[in-house]
């Protein structure tokens, strides 16, 4: 079973731990951390750890992009990135005095021929995979309909698409006639999308908004509160136990990995929702972003409850 992940704007994530961050002078860093980053790459790693065969695609240059590809290949992930002339980005997190200052490069501008090359590449890979996870924002140079174009191609081949993006990119997809199978907003993203505060009290009504017509799975992740979902018109509440958290960054991406894995395996709705939440929780229990320790999987899974509302 193979799953395709799409990361259009990957990055080298750099972390600089500093005792003090001094402005307007030199800061020397002893222990630099560098990893392949971008939401779709977190999804790729967790999928691999779940036991799936993973094909990763996106745009990559021949310097940092090649480094990312090398990194992913070392983890057993098949890489089919489209080469670009722009520069793959670095994203820097300065960890200082208990705070985190981030410097996030916007990333390269994608040329029209490169976008076309990507679409041809995407069509060719689709025949080999059962499902697709698309994550993150669109790089400059691509039209807002780019994700909808990918979804249209996938729908034609009857391959499920799990889409995790936000803001105007998500809105553009929801307003298009080609719908993804799954979206995974959190409450903040829903609030943004609907222009009114979405809470657990009004979530059922909010998910009836016609903006969501035609989307089979809407999984709203709620951090330590678990999740709420609307699947084929039915509502579900996923309740999770309290856990010790080390680093919850990337838990949403791990959740996406669980969703696309469960759906590609035709698991029941209940088990797919549980799998997704367990993956999010396992990610939160690790220091590394986009990583789960599968040894703890079953013990957590057995403690989750999915209730029809
Ligand atoms: P991110 O953007 O950081 O990836 P997100 O907002 O997309 O996060 P969350 O709702 O924070 O996603 O987390 C996804 C899932 O991970 C949750 O539904 C839950 O199952 C699990 N999770 C996240 N944070 C915690 C936590 N503090 N305790 C227990 N489980 C958590």
Image: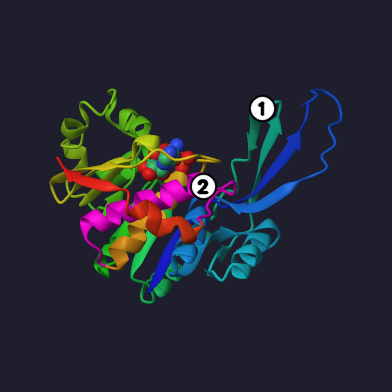
Q: Position of residue 269 (x, y in %)?
A: 22, 56
Residues in magenta, as a range: 266-292
Q: Secondary structure at mark 2?
A: loop
Describe residue 268's horizontal placement relative to residue 7 as left or right. left
Q: Is residue 135 visible?
A: no
Residue identifier under label 2: 139
Tell me if residue 90 comes above or below residue 5 in the rendering.
Answer: above
Q: Position of residue 48 (x, y in %)?
A: 49, 65
Residue identifier under label 1: 98
Q: Position of residue 139 (x, y in %)?
A: 51, 47
Residue at point 42%, 73% (across, down): 125
Mark 1 touches mark 2? (CB < 8 Å): no
Q: Nearer the viewer, residue 5 or 58?
A: 5
**In whole angstroms, how far apart are the C-alphas of marks 1 and 2?**
31 Å
Residue at point 24%, 44% (across, down): 229
Describe residue 199's horizontal placement relative to residue 140 as left or right. left
């Amino acid at each position: 079973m193979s799953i395709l992940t799409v990361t259009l704007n990957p990055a080298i994530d750099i972390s600089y731990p500093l005792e003090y961050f001094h402005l307007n002078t030199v800061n020397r860093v002893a222990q630099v951390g560098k990893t392949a980053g971008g939401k779709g790459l977190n999804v790729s790693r967790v999928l691999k750890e779940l036991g799936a065969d993973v094909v990763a695609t996106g745009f990559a240059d021949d310097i940092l992009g090649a480094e990312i590809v090398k990194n992913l290949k070392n983890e057993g992930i098949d890489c089919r990135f489209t080469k670009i002339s722009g520069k793959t980005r670095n994203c820097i997190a300065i960890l200082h005095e208990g705070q985190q200052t981030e410097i996030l490069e916007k990333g390269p501008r994608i040329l029209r021929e490169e976008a076309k090359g990507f679409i041809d590449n995407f069509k060719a890979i689709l025949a080999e995979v059962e499902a697709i996870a698309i994550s993150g924002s669109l790089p400059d140079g691509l039209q807002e309909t780019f994700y909808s174009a990918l979804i249209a191609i996938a729908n034609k081949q009857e391959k499920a698409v799990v889409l995790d993006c936000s803001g105007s990119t998500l809105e553009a997809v929801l307003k298009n006639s080609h719908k993804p199978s799954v979206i995974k907003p959190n409450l903040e993203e829903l609030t943004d999308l609907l222009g009114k505060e979405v809470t657990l009290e009004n979530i059922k009504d909010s998910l009836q908004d016609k903006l969501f017509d035609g989307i089979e799975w809407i999984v709203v992740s709620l951090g330590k509160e678990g999740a709420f979902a609307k699947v084929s018109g039915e509502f579900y509440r996923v309740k999770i136990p309290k856990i010790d958290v080390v680093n919850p960054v990337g838990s949403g991406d791990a959740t996406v990995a669980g969703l696309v894995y469960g759906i590609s395996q035709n698991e029941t709705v209940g088990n797919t929702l549980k799998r997704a939440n367990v993956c999010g929780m396992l990610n939160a229990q690790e220091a590394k972003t986009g990583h789960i320790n599968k040894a703890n999987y079953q013990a957590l899974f057995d403690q989750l409850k999915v209730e029809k509302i």
